[in-house]
Amino acid sequence: MENKLSGKSDGVNRDQLGQMKAEVIKMGKFSFEMEEKREQSLIVQSGYMLTGFSIISVMLLAAVPILLDYTDFSRELVFIVLGLSLIFLIFSLFFTIGALWRYEHIGLEDVESIYNLMSFESIDAADDWWLKNINEIYSAKNELNTKRSRFMKASIASFGFSILTILIYLISLFIIML
């Protein structure tokens, strides 16, 4: 078969070519739907990160007065750990916002353009138009979702460093108290 499902073929009759195009269209729709689900999953995960950011921020800011008023811990060290942890949390927040951002992207053409498919000379021309458009949209969505995924990875790493900073401080305090 030559030229990717065009009218030219080597030993493939027209019916087989039509069936192959139908399968390619079905796979294209499936790929597009999977990319849509990936986008929604990344947005939901970003929402969870915002929730985690809020909870940890409140816990940190509520714990500082308790640590300062009811313990003999060094004020300077508490503020250093708090500051370092909050810096990582703020980075996490910015990366999460980057993942949640609704970037401009391409979509299907308007209804009139799709309606004009009816005026194509053949179903093959309509199929070719559909394949071209679904591929462009899929590629754009994939690129945006990859960008969102990178933001989420950076957000999770920053969040983890913030938690790790607090844990190291608490473990060191526990060891010192022994």
Image: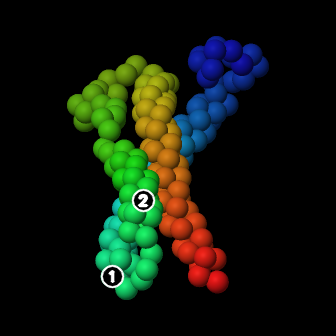
Quarter of the image with the C terminus is: bottom right
Residue drawn 38% across the image and 69% down it: 75
- Mark sitting earlier along the chain (1/2): 1
Q: Distance between the residues labelled 1 and 2?
A: 17 Å
Residue drawn 32% across the image and 45% down it: 101
x then y, percent, for residue 21 = 58, 32
Helix or strand or loop: what does disc 2 sit on? helix
The furthest residue to the right? 11
x then y, percent, for residue 4 = 63, 20
Q: Return the residue at label 2.
A: 80
Q: Return the residue at label 1.
A: 69
Between residue 171 and residue 163, name the one nearer to us: 171
Residue drawn 50% across the image and 47% down it: 154
Quarter of the image with the N terminus is: top right
Amino acid on which disc 1 is placed: Asp
Q: How is the image coloured?
A: rainbow
Residue drawn 68% across the image and 15% down it: 2
Give me the disc on residue 25: none
Q: Can residue 38 be seen in this view?
A: no
Between residue 146 and residue 105, name the one nearer to us: 146
Between residue 116 and residue 60, name the one nearer to us: 60
Between residue 173 and residue 25, name the one nearer to us: 173
Please say if 65 is above or below 6.
Answer: below
Helix or strand or loop: what does disc 1 sit on? helix
Q: Can residue 12 be seen in this view?
A: yes
x then y, percent, for residue 83 = 38, 58
Q: Quadrant of residue 12?
A: top right
Q: How many marks?
A: 2
x then y, percent, for residue 44 = 41, 60
Please say if 87 is above or below 55.
Answer: above
